[in-house]
Image (cartoon, helix red, strand yellow):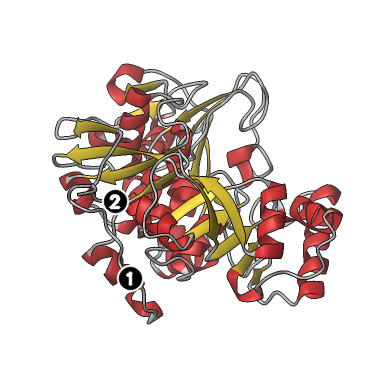
């Protein structure tokens, strides 16, 4: 009797029309949803170079401008124009231009594009974010995406499965960012190369979709092909408004995982990834006295309404340290609007933070908060490599929105539980 299948294996088997698949198999899989952003410019180039004339299904392609929004220079404006021309030429309705969407990974989740059991591909490495909803979501290259645009399918190797079991109770003023940084600190940046990480355990069961999106988003930082979480009642509640039908695929009890790792988060303190690797993770207590010049709250990792509420709780009635500039970028227009309605912007503005339009912006060193030499930023983003947010001699510390806000208040990395 053959062993059961993991969630990832079931999705890839269905997408490739097979009864079952196993790690190492090469499959031709039909894509349920393809997403691109400014990278679409390069996808379009490859699409035309291969002689393609028409996209395979305009209803299964979503293009979202998010990296340079609004356009920050002539180059980014030209990129946007190329994409708009392609969208008009191909009759793509699912195009979210400036002011109509936000950061792509957030939009796929909040607008109901992603459902459990889907195969989702995106021309961005953090596409696994959507795995929080029980989909197999992965980033692919420009040429691969051009082929998907033309044919609606691609071949890929079925990845090995890594099961991350997180148990215990999360402490106060902590969130999914602390949990996943703890995992990355143990597994390192090469600990899950081309693997499907399935996150499970009582800690994962207890947290909401916002935290789960953060966790799957950063599976990429361990080299994973995807990060995924089995759908449950919280997933159903999150997607209920869409009215869409789907099959909630889950791993079999006897599914085979090539590796399993256990984490007890009960006594975990807030975590910080220090320069200049995401796996250089330390507890916040080890970083007392480390000064910061900028605090950034936003990105596809931690720009959701829950993240803004957390920061506002810390900042309410307080003033940001005089030597710190704090930048807030909600991850979508909907979140921006919700934050306004809840009065969060009043709190941010009164504390002397600045608020910018939804965009990837400073996360990748694009615009809206680029660092100079010698400056340090504590950021809710997902990467802190050399020159990631600006000058090669700048420094980026990654932390939760709680820790970012607390550090902005005191001008140095601060435990949010002490505020």
First reached walking from the N terminus: tag 2 or tag 1: 2
Q: Which residue is painted at 47% across and 53% down in the image?
A: 137
Q: Which residue is mark 2?
A: 5
Q: Which residue is painted at 43% across and 41% down in the image?
A: 159
Q: Residues within 10 Å of mark 2 (few under 14, many from 20)?
A: many
Q: Give the residue at the far bottom of this rendering.
A: 243
Q: Which residue is mark 1?
A: 247
- Inspect this view and state whether residue 317 appears: no
Q: Is residue 182 left or right of residue 77?
A: left
Image-quadrant location for residue 50: bottom right
Whether the residues at callouts 2 and 1 have beta carbons within 8 Å, the answer is no
Residue 1 in the image, given as x and y percentages of width and height: 19, 49
Residue 8 in the image, given as x and y percentages of width and height: 37, 51
79 vs 379: above or below: below
* Separation of marks 2 and 1 at Cα, in angstroms: 16 Å
Q: Nearer the viewer, mark 2 or mark 1?
A: 2
Residue 319 in the image, given as x and y percentages of width and height: 42, 42
Q: Which residue is painted at 65% across and 37% down in the image?
A: 365
């Amino acid at each position: 009797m053959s062993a059961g299948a993991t969630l990832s294996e079931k999705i890839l088997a269905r997408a490739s029309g097979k009864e079952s698949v196993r790690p190492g198999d090469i499959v031709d899989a039909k894509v349920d949803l393809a997403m691109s952003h400014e990278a679409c410019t390069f996808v379009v180039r490859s699409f035309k170079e291969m002689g393609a004339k028409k996209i395979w299904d305009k209803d299964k392609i979503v293009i979202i401008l998010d990296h340079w929004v609004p356009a920050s220079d002539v180059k980014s404006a030209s990129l946007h124009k190329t994409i708009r021309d392609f969208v008009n030429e191909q009759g793509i309705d699912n195009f979210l231009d400036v002011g109509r969407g936000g950061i792509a990974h957030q939009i796929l989740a909040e607008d109901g594009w992603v459902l459990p059991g889907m195969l989702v591909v995106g021309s961005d490495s953090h596409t696994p974010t959507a795995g929080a909803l029980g989909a197999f979501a992965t980033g692919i290259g420009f040429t691969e995406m051009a082929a998907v645009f033309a044919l609606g399918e691609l071949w890929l190797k079925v990845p090995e499965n890594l099961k991350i079991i997180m148990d215990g109770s999360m402490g106060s003023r902590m969130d999914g960012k602390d949990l996943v940084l703890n995992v990355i600190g143990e597994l390192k940046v090469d600990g899950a190369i081309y693997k499907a990480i399935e996150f499970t355990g009582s800690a994962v069961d207890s947290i909401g979709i916002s935290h789960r999106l953060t966790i799957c988003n950063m599976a990429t930082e361990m080299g994973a092909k995807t990060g995924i979480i089995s759908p449950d009642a919280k997933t159903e509640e999150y997607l209920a408004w869409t009215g869409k039908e789907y099959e909630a695929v889950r791993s079999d009890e006897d599914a085979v995982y090539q590796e399993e790792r256990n984490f007890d988060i009960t006594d975990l303190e807030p975590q910080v990834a220090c320069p200049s690797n995401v796996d250089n993770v330390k507890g916040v207590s080890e970083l007392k006295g480390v000064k910061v010049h900028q605090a950034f709250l936003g990105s596809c990792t931690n720009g959701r309404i829950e993240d803004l509420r957390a920061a506002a709780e810390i900042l309410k009635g307080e003033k940001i340290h005089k030597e710190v500039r704090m930048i807030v970028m909600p991850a979508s227009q909907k979140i921006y609007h919700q934050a306004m309605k809840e009065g969060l912007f009043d709190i941010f503005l009164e504390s002397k933070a600045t608020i910018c339009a939804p965009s990837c912006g400073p996360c990748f060193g694009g615009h809206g908060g680029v660092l100079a030499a010698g400056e340090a930023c504590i950021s809710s983003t997902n990467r802190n490599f050399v020159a990631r947010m600006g000058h090669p001699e700048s420094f980026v510390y990654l932390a939760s929105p709680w820790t970012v806000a607390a550090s902005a208040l005191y001008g140095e990395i601060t435990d949010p539980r002490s505020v």
